Image (cartoon, rainbow, N blue to C red):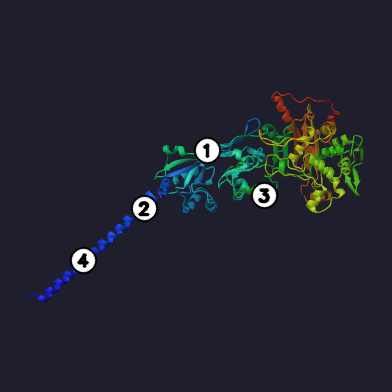
């Protein structure tokens, strides 16, 4: 028997449970309804932005996910010699770039390990690109000249699941002559540095760009450097690339750089390089009739191919730590005392001012005394009676001491500057030095001291504070040889140059100086080793001490190499000269020993003319005195 009250309680409890279940189900349904409404509103808002508010932005983002812009690097123009022969070419290679659009910093360490790169340097390089604000589409070059093994590593790891940022690009890299041939004249290329990017000259370039760093490569960088292009490709989900025919019109072809023809003659350059082998110094050959540089050598040299890609730290350290300074272009930067090569200018200055004439004669006992100080001549026993011609031929110091003492320092400086010393020649190469021509104003400006008359005596023979560069010496003698007209030296053909600078010297005075230089080579003078049968070679030796006799003695005792620098400058033929050659041999000791270097270059020039069917220059007159024995045994300059 059931109790009625209990039945009623059960019924009430069941009703309550039913009401609770119904209420819970309704809440769940309402919650899901609200969620669906929120999702719908979010989608509607997104579609509104995508289709109505910002369609261009999202379209561009979508394209970037599937389309890449691959840079097409423009090859630099070739560098040719005067006959059109290739000096500097390009060669095909592969470089590895990082696509900044796909770059993930956590990938850098395994990439560095796989390609034997310095991880810290790689991170720093990426950071430099990011901080300089380079466009996102510009890739970062991280390795040049990929080897087959490195190419295999990249090909096996550049899929989207591994390193999608890796991109191999075919490039044309510089190929320079071997053994440093014409290295200083040509220069080299390299990646633009942070310092350079902050200068007006290179402000338009970007991090990673390869530019000319020195020599012709830098001077004519804008001519040699082409304009990079780009190629658009579509990348699928597997990282494979395919061309987009409908977008080919958006590709930008690379514009190669222009070829550059130099005035350098490879035949003469090779001869000059061989002549300077295992020596430290420079050779410069110029056509005085137009200023064209026919050869330029600086030794020791370096290998520009080290710079064609990024130079290794070890190689760079070896170059800058080398005590012989192989990066120095001695042809235009070595500032050395000219020694007796200064004497032709001294002779001309003396004649032009009337300080000396044809009747001016000095007695040389081997020394001379000025201002209570004795100055020695290079020939201990002296030269005896000396006139202008003999003074040049035998390079008598006593004769020129007296000429200098009569002229005074300011007139010496005036005429030295007239023939082009003490100023840059203006050659189209960077970093040319200007040398020093001392004067009273120069000493006050630089040392706040007055000039003492005794200092003039050393300057008169090309010592003291006087310094010249090989290019200046060649230019100064070349201008005198053609009658007092100086063309600006230049390295390239078909490049506008300023008109020649003319100085109105007395032609008879110039002729007397040239006759003396002819005697230096052909009349038993100090330059007999430069003599070439059948060609009227004129020249002048020079021996420049590096310090006082006392200092030299101390250095010799200490085992230091303080031998004098040796100079020789020569031109040919005597009438209407076609070529002038200046050579510097650092620590070569005496000028006569450097004369064969100039002789070899002069001979190569005229021998080539014969091979090409051009006549050799005719001998204009009969030499005063031809003594083969004396010529083959030159005196000490």
Q: CA distance from mark 3 to mark 4?
A: 90 Å
Q: CA distance from mark 3 to mark 2?
A: 64 Å
| Dot in front, 3 or 2 | 2
Secondary structure of the residue carrying numbered label 1: loop
Q: Position of residue 175 (x, y in %)?
A: 59, 38
Q: Is residue 478 left or right of residue 34?
A: right
Q: CA distance from mark 1 to mark 4?
A: 75 Å
| Earlier residue among tags 3 and 2 | 2
Q: Tell me whether the residue at label 3 lies in contact with that at label 1, contact meaning CB atoms closer than 8 angstroms.
A: no
* Crowding near the residue tagged with mark 2, few <14, some 14–19, many ≥20 C-alpha atoms within 10 Å: few
Please give the label number shown on residue 21: 4
Which of the 4 image quadrants contains residue 590?
top right
To which residue does mark 1 refer?
Answer: 254
Extreme residue in the front direction = 52
| Earlier residue among tags 3 and 1 | 1
Secondary structure of the residue carrying numbered label 3: helix
| Dot in front, 3 or 4 | 4
Q: Position of residue 32 (x, y in %)?
A: 27, 60
* Crowding near the residue tagged with mark 1, few <14, some 14–19, many ≥20 C-alpha atoms within 10 Å: some
Q: Is residue 7 left or right of residue 281?
A: left
| Earlier residue among tags 1 and 2 | 2
The answer to whether residue 529 of the structure is visible from this angle is no
The image shows residue 626, relative to residue 46, as above or below, that is above
Secondary structure of the residue carrying numbered label 2: helix
To which residue does mark 2 refer?
Answer: 46
Q: What quarter of the picture does the C terminus occupy?
A: top right
Pick the front one: 332 or 178 = 332
Secondary structure of the residue carrying numbered label 4: helix
| Earlier residue among tags 2 and 4 | 4
To which residue does mark 3 refer?
Answer: 321
Q: Tell me whether the residue at label 1 lies in contact with that at label 4, contact meaning CB atoms closer than 8 angstroms.
A: no
């Amino acid at each position: 028997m059931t109790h009625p009250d209990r039945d009623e309680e059960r019924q009430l409890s069941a009703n309550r449970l039913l009401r609770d279940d119904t209420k819970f189900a309704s809440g769940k349904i309402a919650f899901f309804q609200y969620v669906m409404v929120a999702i719908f509103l979010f989608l509607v808002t997104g579609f509104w932005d995508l289709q109505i508010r910002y369609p261009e932005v999202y379209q561009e983002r979508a394209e970037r996910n599937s389309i890449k812009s691959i840079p097409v690097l423009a090859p630099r123009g070739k560098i040719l010699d005067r006959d059109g022969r290739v000096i500097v070419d390009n060669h095909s290679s592969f470089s590895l770039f990082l696509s900044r659009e796909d770059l993930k910093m956590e990938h850098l360490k395994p990439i560095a390990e796989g390609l034997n790169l310095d991880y810290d340097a790689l991170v720093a390089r990426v950071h430099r690109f990011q901080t300089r604000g380079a466009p996102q589409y510009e890739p970062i070059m991280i390795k040049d000249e990929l080897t087959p093994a490195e190419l295999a590593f990249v090909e096996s790891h550049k899929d989207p699941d591994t390193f999608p940022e890796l991109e191999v690009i075919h490039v044309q890299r510089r190929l320079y002559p071997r053994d440093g041939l014409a290295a200083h004249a040509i220069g080299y290329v390299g990646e633009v540095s942070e310092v350079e990017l902050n200068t007006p000259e290179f402000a338009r370039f970007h991090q990673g760009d390869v530019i000319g760093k020195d020599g012709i490569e830098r001077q004519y960088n804008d001519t040699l450097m082409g304009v990079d292009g780009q190629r658009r490709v579509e990348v699928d989900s597997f990282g494979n690339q395919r061309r987009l025919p409908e977008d080919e019109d958006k590709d930008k072809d690379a514009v190669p750089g222009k070829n550059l023809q130099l005035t350098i003659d490879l035949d003469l350059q090779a001869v000059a390089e061989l002549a300077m082998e295992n020596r430290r110094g420079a050779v410069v050959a110029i056509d005085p009739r137009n200023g064209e540089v026919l050869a330029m050598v600086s030794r020791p040299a370096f290998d520009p191919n080290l710079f064609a890609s990024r130079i290794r730290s070890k190689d760079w350290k070896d170059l800058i730590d080398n005590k012989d300074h192989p990066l120095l272009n001695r042809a235009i930067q070595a500032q050395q005392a000219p020694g007796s090569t200064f004497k032709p200018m001294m002779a001309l200055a003396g004649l032009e001012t009337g300080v000396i004439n044809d009747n001016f004669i000095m007695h040389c006992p081997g020394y001379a005394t000025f201002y209570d100080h004795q100055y020695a001549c290079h020939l201990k026993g002296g030269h005896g009676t000396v006139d202008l011609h003999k003074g040049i031929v035998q390079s008598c110091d006593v004769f020129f001491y007296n000429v200098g003492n009569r002229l005074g320092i300011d007139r010496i400086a005036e005429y030295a500057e007239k023939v082009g010393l003490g100023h840059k020649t203006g050659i189209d190469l960077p970093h040319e030095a200007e040398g020093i021509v001392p004067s009273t104003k120069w000493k006050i400006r630089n040392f706040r001291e007055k000039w003492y008359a005794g200092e003039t005596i050393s300057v008169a023979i090309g010592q003291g504070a006087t310094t010249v560069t090989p290019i200046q010496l060649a230019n100064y003698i070349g201008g005198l040889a053609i009658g007092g007209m100086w063309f600006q030296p230049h390295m390239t053909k078909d490049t506008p140059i300023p008109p020649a600078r003319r100085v109105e010297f007395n032609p008879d005075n110039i002729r007397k100086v040239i006759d003396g230089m002819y005697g230096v080579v052909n009349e038993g003078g100090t330059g007999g080793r430069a003599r070439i049968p059948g060609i009227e070679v004129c020249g002048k030796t020079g021996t420049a001490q590096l310090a006082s006799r006392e200092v030299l003695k101390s250095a010799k005792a200490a085992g230091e190499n303080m031998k004098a620098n040796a100079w020789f400058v020569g031109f040919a033929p005597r009438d209407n000269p076609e070529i002038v050659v200046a050579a510097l041999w650092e620590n070569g000791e005496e000028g006569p020993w450097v004369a064969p270097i100039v002789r070899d270059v002069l001979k190569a020039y005229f021998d080539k003319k014969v091979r090409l069917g051009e006549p050799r220059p005719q001998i204009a007159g009969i030499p005063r005195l031809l003594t083969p024995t004396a010529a083959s045994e030159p005196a000490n300059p």
